Structure formats: structure tokens, C-alpha cells
Amino acid sequence: MDEGLHIISAIVEDRPGVLFKVTSLIRRRGFNIATITVGSTEKEKVSRITMTMGGDVRIVEQLIKQLSKIPDVVKITELTPTESVYRELAIVKVSAQDQAKRSDILNYITIFRGRVIDASKDSLIIEIVGSPNKINAFLDLMKSFGIAELARTGMVALARGTKSMDD
């Protein structure tokens, strides 16, 4: 993970307008969020927002304090890279017009433990899951083949072991 990148996980009530409140606060306060993802949790009517941001500890603490003031935010915490598991998903469409290029791309996919999720005579669509550094390394290799399109999810993360946001 990049030096100085912080992972913030918030459990929020799953109601209309909650994401708007969170993103409005981020915008008004001028925080620079690198990624933000939202999804359901194991509990009904509760969602998890995972954000990553750069900056020093004081800025992260300020964001956490500000987000804690939103009534729909149930709990918020910073996850440390050594005590959490984090992943990102990327779907990449790569030009693969000739057989030699296609073979090289397939070898890289195997090395990076990705998988082909669609193929045509001129391109491959690849799914790759891992740390942002792993995905960046894969994308750097794919640039020479020609990335036609790219979609990344942003990071999701959970604390390791039995520790949970309920504790």
C-alpha cells in the first residue's frame, strides 16, 4: 500500500441521502479522498463506506471527527494496513489483435492471478483483484498492449481476525 495512504471504514444506516451527507461533508471541508466505495454488510439496513485518502494523521483524525457528527454514521474507524485485509477490483479491456500479443497477455494474467471474463477477436476483458499496488503493476504491463477501457472499484477493507466494527 502507498506510504501515507489511510483506510477509513464507516458503518452507516442504509437510508436515502446518507452517502450524499458524507460526500457533501468531504467536499465542504476540502478533504481529498482517493477512493470511496459503498456496499451492504452482513446486517440489514446497514452499509459500509470505505474511503482511502492521503495526508497526515491530523487530517485523517479531523475527517473521522467530522463524519462522527453525522447522525446516520453508526461507527467509523481507521484501519491500519498491517491489521486489515484490503482489496480492489479492476476490469480492463486490452487490445489483443495478434496471437503473439494475446499469448503474452494471457501469461501476464496467469502471473497476476487474474482471469479473462470476455474475449473477442480483437480484445480481452480481464478481471484482476488485489492490492492497489498489484493492480497498478498489472496495468503498467498492459499499457504496452493498449488499454482500451478501465474500470476500478476503489478499495474495500476489513479488520483481520475476530476484531470487527461491532467491538
Image (cartoon, helix red, strand yellow):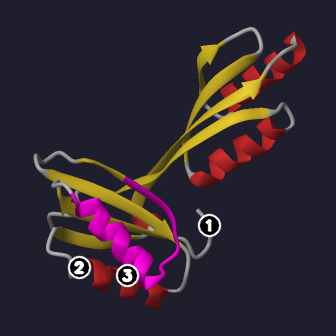
Along the viewing direction, whichever of 14 and 145 lies nearer the viewer: 14
Q: Amino acid at mark 3?
A: Leu
Q: Position of residue 103 (x, y in %)?
A: 81, 16
Instruction: From the image, tell me which residue sits under label 1.
Output: 2
Give how far apart the Cα atoms at labels 1 and 2 are. Answer: 26 Å
Q: Was residue 32 drawn as part of the magenta stretch in this picture? A: yes
Answer left or right for 67 relative to 121.
left
| Bounds of the magenta segment | 17-37
Q: Amino acid at mark 1?
A: Asp
Q: Earlier in the sequence, mark 3 or mark 1?
A: 1
Of labels 1 and 2, the one closer to you: 2
Q: Is residue 44 above or below residue 24?
A: above
Quadrant showing the C terminus: bottom left
Quadrant showing the N terminus: bottom right
Q: Earlier in the sequence, mark 2 or mark 3?
A: 3
Q: Earlier in the sequence, mark 1 or mark 2?
A: 1
Q: Secondary structure at mark 3?
A: helix
Instruction: From the image, tell me which residue sits under label 3.
Output: 63
Q: Is residue 76 above or below residue 57?
A: above
Instruction: From the image, tell me which residue sits under label 2.
Output: 68
